[in-house]
Each structure stands twice: as C-alpha cells, then as structure tokens.
Amino acid sequence: MLEPKRTNNRNRGFYVRMRLLHNNSRNVRTSEKSFCYRYFKWVLWFSLSFYFFASFLFNHKPNNTISFISKTTVSQSKASRALIESINSSALLQYPKHHQDSLNGLKIYVYELPTKYNSDWLTNERCSNHLFASEVAIHRALLNSDVRTFDPWEADFFFVPVYVSCNFSTVNGFPAIGHARSLIGSAVELISSQFPFWNRSLGSDHVFVASHDFGACFHTLEDVAMADGIPEILRNSIILQTFGVKYDHPCQRAEHVVIPPYVSPESVRKTLATSDVNGKRDIFAFFRGKMEVHPNNVSGRYYSKKVRTVILQKYGNDRRFYLKRHRFAGYQSEILRSTFCLCPLGWAPWSPRLVESVVLGCVPVIIADGIELPFSSAVPWADISVTVAEKDVGKLGSILEHVAATNLSIIQQKLWDPRITRSLLFHDRTVEGDATWQVLHALTQKLSMSHRRSRVSNE
Ligand SMILES: *[C@@H]1O[C@H](CO)[C@@H](O)[C@H](O)[C@H]1NC(C)=O
Ligand SMILES: *[C@@H]1O[C@H](CO)[C@@H](O)[C@H](O)[C@H]1NC(C)=O
Ligand SMILES: *[C@@H]1O[C@H](CO)[C@@H](O)[C@H](O)[C@H]1NC(C)=O
Ligand SMILES: *[C@@H]1O[C@H](CO)[C@@H](O)[C@H](O)[C@H]1NC(C)=O
Ligand SMILES: *[C@@H]1O[C@H](CO)[C@@H](O)[C@H](O)[C@H]1NC(C)=O
C-alpha cells in the first residue's frame, strides 16, 4: 500500500493547505469568545426556562379531568428539591473546555470536500433542520470542536462530510436518496486518490453519517434496503446512523453508532419560550402523524406494520387519546401539553418523536419491536419511557392507565433530567454530554479501528 513520505510533492501541497487552514483557525478563535458568550447565554436561558417549565409542572398538579394522574403526582417539596438539585448539579451549567480529558485525546480530521458534496445543498434551509439533518449538524460541530485536528497524520479518525438527504422531492417534499450511493462513492474515490489514508486502512478509520430510515442501505422500503445492503465501499467504515435494531440486520452490518434523529435545539427553545406558562399536561396520550385507514400493501409490507392503523381504529374516538393525521407546524406545543407521546414505528422503527417527546417532557411510548435506542450509556431509556409490544397496541389504553396509576411520577422525575435532554440534541458547538459529544465518546470505544492508534500501541 502506498504510504508517501512527508517530503513528497503531495505533502508540500498539504502543508500549504494546513497553513491556510491555520489562518482560518485563528479567525475561528477570535470569534470563539463571542461564540462562548452567546452559547453561555443560551444555556442560561435554557436552564431558566427549563426551571420555570419544570417547576410549574412540579408545583401544579394536573387538572382532574383525568383523575388517576393527579393521584400519582409527586409531593411538592420532594419534587422541588429534586429539581433544584438537578439545576444546581453542574450538569447543565458546566462548560467544559477540555474535551480531550474525557475523550482519551481523540483527534479527528475533517476532509474538506468540494462544495457539491455538502455546503451547496444548504441553499435549501430545510437541509440543516429536517429530521435527517444530523449529517449537517455533526459536520458543523466537528468543524468547531476541540477534537478536530488539521494534521491528518495525527488523526485517529477521518470524517467524510457528504450530505445525501437534502435532495428534496419536488413531488412530495421527502428527501430523494436515490443519488446517495453515487455521491458517497464519488467522494470516496476522491479522498482515496488524493490522500493516502483511505487505502492504508481500507476505510476502517473513516466515519460517515447515514441518517435515513435504514441507515447506509439508502432506501425507504425495508425489503429493498435489505436486498441492496450497505454499499461495498462503506462496509469497513464506521457509520453513524439513526437506524438500529437489537437483532442481526443487513443494514447494520458495518461498525456503527446509533444516533438520535435531528431535532433543532432552536425549535425546542422557541416552543418553550412561546408556550403558555399556565399550560397543563391536559392531553393524556398524543400522536400526530401518518395513520392510514386502509394501508396499502407495498411490495408485501404495510406502513408501520399496520400499528398506526390499529391505533386509529381502536382509539380514534377515545377521549383520552388526541390523535391527528395532518401536519401542523405547532405540534411541539402539543407535545408539551401531553403526558404520554406515542412513538410507533413508521417504515423504520425509529422516529423523531423519540427525541421531541423526551426534550419536551412527555413520556415516550415506544411501539417498535426490537428497536435499538441511541446512546444507551447516557440515556436510561427503560426508566424514562414506556415500551409496548407491537402485538399489544390494541391494549394501549389500559397499559397507559396502569402506568399512570402506578409509576408515572417516577418515570417523569427521571425524564426531566436536563442531562438527558442535552444528550439527545446536536449543537453547532459541541458541549460535554451533548449528542455530538456522545458520538465522540462512542468513537473512543472504537479506537482499535484507528490505523494510527493501533500503530502507536504496537510500537
Ligand atoms: C450548588 O449549591 C451549593 C450550595 O447549596 C453551592 O455551594 C454551589 O456553588 C452550587 N453550585 C452551582 C453550580 O451553582
Ligand atoms: C435529485 O433527485 C432527483 C430525483 O430523484 C434526481 O433526478 C437528481 O439527479 C438528484 N440530484 C442530484 C444532484 O443527485
Ligand atoms: C488507492 O487505491 C486505489 C485503488 O487501488 C488507487 O487507484 C489509488 O491511486 C490509491 N490511492 C493512493 C493515494 O495511492
Ligand atoms: C401483499 O403483496 C404481496 C406481493 O407484493 C403478496 O404476496 C401478499 O399476499 C399481499 N398481502 C396481502 C395481505 O394482500
Ligand atoms: C412502570 O410500570 C410498568 C408496568 O407495571 C413496568 O413495565 C415498567 O417497567 C415500570 N417502569 C418504571 C420506570 O418503573
């Protein structure tokens, strides 16, 4: 395998490049102060609004329209103490500067690809905000991160920033991902011909984001996705993907990290800011989204395995359930008003509702057999959610009533931990414990795949 010495022409080009980049980095540093300041203001604002929001919830027992909920509300003094402890625990306000300490000195090189692979797509504002936008968010966070290195020779991992989810269909507005394989393929061709790093490890220390229904299989329909599999060229690499199941599946037959779907922290902040301060969790169980009355048989499969159809049939007229089939821009405020938020599978098991309900304090009700949830080392999913088997969806009403009558307040207390909220949101500038940080932390567990680290440890 070709491994150029540091003196050849290609590397001279590389040092010029580095100098240029370092000039940039100085600019980045001067703007860093105002960045920190802005960020700190945001954190402070968030902790305050969280405080007001959460203390309201703790201090006001829900209205008795649903009497069994009020029975289980935690006692006021205990709750306020827990709340103050969680606010005063350094969890939310701590602003760690030295990521390296907690991330085992991790260093990541971010390839600078021609803009057609990434930033050109940002002309459409939706590109950096929709549910697949973690491909943009992680790239941005890495560019700003302390783990970024400008010297690829000292990098443990290489990040390949290709945005494949922003070619929105002019027909239905959904991302068309038919071009994903060729776009990524051409990016890999480029980096493997211009840099020595891909060839020396066969891509095993290269990191990609594949935030679609079935990850790097790049197809919405599971049977097609499974038949196509992960492109050959990516199979050695590390894939950050929203798709995850606990059983063997062709779309996770590559080293991978399960990441949360993208929810814009700004949208959450806005919802909290504009929400009615006197708001109550007056909705018992909430779902807004596609629910087909007569689901089509699409190549042998039904949307959401008909789970959503059963929910609609069984609970469409049940007053405890607030079920809506149409899009509504203000749906986050509905989540804020809800006690339980249903997170049934769609085509794939995961859904953005998982994140939205957690960060807005609504207990997620996960109906997606075998789903592997993101960042299980940081988020105690079993303690903060309710899981209902797909086959039991017809008993949802009694299951949720039982939870409300027994352990709802315990679940809510654990759910309203700001550290959990933070771990599921991607910020442009990563802070310890946030979603990008969790990704970095997961990568430190995979250092054996790093060409550089394995060589260093062999020496
Ligand atoms: C938390 O509260 C204690 C006193 O109860 C105080 O000494 C400490 O500085 C507080 N920590 C933060 C991060 O506010
Ligand atoms: C975007 O998607 C359309 C429809 O699938 C496709 O024809 C087009 O080639 C794609 N654009 C790019 C730049 O890949
Ligand atoms: C990496 O391998 C490919 C295929 O063997 C080759 O075309 C390419 O030139 C190699 N890259 C470098 C930098 O040598
Ligand atoms: C669904 O379609 C597949 C073929 O596309 C067919 O084999 C299967 O019998 C159909 N199922 C039902 C319930 O109609
Ligand atoms: C709450 O109760 C349900 C039903 O009894 C149980 O399955 C679940 O594990 C409990 N959850 C927590 C966090 O205690």
Image (spheres, rainbow, N blue to C red):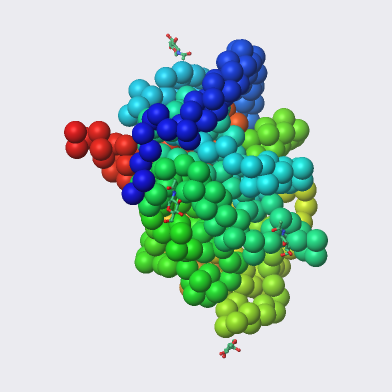
Nearer-the-camera pick, 72 or 274: 274
* Residue 74 screen position, x and y as percent: 49, 36
Whether residue 347 is situated above or below residue 186 in the rendered picture: below
- Relative to 44, residue 67 above or below: below
Image quadrant of residue 294? bottom right
Residue 80 placement (x, y as % from top left) = 51, 25
**Between 295 and 364, the one nearer to me in the picture:** 295
Residue sitting at x 64%, y 61%: 179
Furthest-left residue in this view: 459
Q: Report the image quarter containing ligand 2.
A: bottom right
Answer whether residue 356 is visible to the viewer in this image: no
Q: Could you tell me which residue is drawn at 36 percent across and 46 percent down?
A: 2
Please state the horizontal and vertical placement of residue 92, each as a whole percent of the image: 50, 24
Query: Taking 243 as reference, is 304 left or right?
Result: right
Answer above or below: position of 387 versus 122.
Answer: below
What residue is shown at x 71% (from left), y 75% (from top)? 293
Q: Residue 38 sits in which quadrant?
A: top right
- 113 with respect to 102 (left or right): right
Quadrant in which the C terminus appears: top left
Residue 122 visible here? yes
Query: Residue at horizontal 45%, vertical 63%?
Result: 232
Q: Is residue 2 left or right of residue 434?
A: left
Residue 366 percent across, percent down from the top left:
51, 57
Residue situated furthest right in the rendering: 170
Q: Nearer the viewer, residue 425 or 193?
A: 193
